[in-house]
Image (cartoon, rainbow, N blue to C red):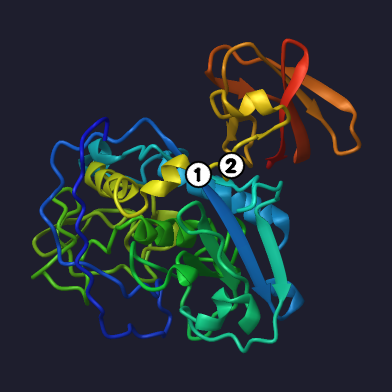
Amino acid sequence: MRGATILFVIVLQFLVGLSCHAQRCGFTGGRVPVSPIQELVPEDEIVIPVVVHIVWQQPEENIPDERVFSQIEALNEAFAAEHIPEGLVPNLFQPFITDTGIRFCLATRDPQGNPTTGIERRHTPLTIAPGGTKELHYTALGGLDAWDPDRYLNIWVTRFAGGITGTAAFPEEGPKEEDGVEVHYEFFGKGATPPYDRGITTVHEAGHWLGLIHPWGPADPTCDEDDGLDDTPLSDVTYQGECPFWLVFSCGTPDMSMNFMYYTDDACMAMFTPQQRDLMWATLNGPRSALKTSEGCAFTPVHADEVERQPLRLWPNPNAGIFWLDAAGGIEIEVYDLAGRLVERLSANGARAAVRHDLPQGIWMVVLRRDGRIVGRQRMSVVR
């Protein structure tokens, strides 16, 4: 928080497990509601590296790369408050729509610094159970090991039993080997199974992973407690399986049912609030602060002297026609197909610049040059 020292204390509550019947979210962590965070100004932006572990039994569970790409896109749109359907958010709540400054990319470097697609797959003998399956997180037990959770957001995609769509580890909750998010394969990415077909299950669980709880509080819905944030109104309704296109009320006030931390259908979820943003940034300056220096999404420098310069970084990745580039000045951009043919030259003005392109859907190699010399390269996925 720009020089401020943030003391972020999390008091964990371990709650009785929620019913698994048609359960929107299997998250059972929580905290005692806190006073709203005051005078917190988030940093400009953070890009969180993501690794997706696909643990599958039947072929339909081994979802294609395109679904993974679309999920990263959905995360970035949600956390940037982009593409909100007109009329979805009532005028009363329009001033609270917030760009969180948090972005996500598929990892381009693994924990050893080697190039990666950010996607792992494993056919498993596991009998998949409801969200929270311990074995899912361990290669030796039939799952896939987490990458260093101080440097990556680990997402496990698999089949859940019992109707749970997703679950997440709260900051500093449970063993680090199991830290991350789990999502039922049917509800991962865009074009998934309705009514959770727009990638919002992962958005909701990423909110938990960054410290948010449900607006009605850490336990079952009641007007006696909430999430401790003033700009998410008191509520005792989850809106599980509902999609209200009008103001709805509980606890004597309008409910922000379109908030990503409700249980509303994907088509009716649209926003985070300023205080939710601030709480997530408190997490990023507290228990998840190591993510701020992760190089999981960095370009791979090809000369030793480039390591000493400002990190090379391109995000979002995947993207749909525009990306941002972080690099020291004097950079030229070339795009090659996977056969090594030059297909386009792009320009970036300034150290942090928006770069627009007309590349079709697919995977491309982006090469950076400085003074004619190649200084970095990265694969980039385009989703149309």
Location of residue 127 with respect to 226 vertically, above or below: below
Residue drawn at x 60%, y 37% is 298
Q: Quadrant of the C terminus?
A: top right
Choose top left, top right, bottom left or bottom right for residue 4.
top left
Disc tally is 2
350 relative to 260, above or below: above
Left or right relative to 14: residue 382: right
Q: Are marks 1 and 2 in contact (CB under 8 Å)?
A: yes
Distance CA(mark 1)–CA(mark 2):
8 Å
x and y percentages locating residue 124 in the rendered image: 70, 81
Where residue 329 is drawn, which disc sits there?
none
**The N terminus appears in which quarter of the rendering?**
top left
Residue at 47% x, 78% y: name it: 131
88 left or right of 279 in image: right
Label 1, residues with CA under 10 Å away: few <14, some 14-19, many ≥20: some
Where does the image place residue 55, in percent across and percent down from the top left?
65, 73
**Res. 25 visible in picture:** yes
| Of marks 1 and 2, the one in the foreground | 1
In-front residue for pair 56/267: 56
Q: Is residue 142 visible?
A: no
Where is residue 309 shown, x and y percent of the image? 56, 23
Quarter assignment of residue 337: top right
Amino acid bearing label 2: Cys
Q: Give residue 354's quadrant in the image.
A: top right
Front-most of residues 95 and 32: 32
Secondary structure of the residue carrying tag 1 is loop
Residue 294 got which mark? 1
The amino acid on which the numbered mark 1 sits, given as a three-letter code, is: Ser
Q: Residue at x 35, y 61 (%)?
A: 208
Residue wearing tag 2? 297
**Position above or below: 42 against 133:** above
User: Residue 77, image x and y in percent?
Assistant: 48, 42
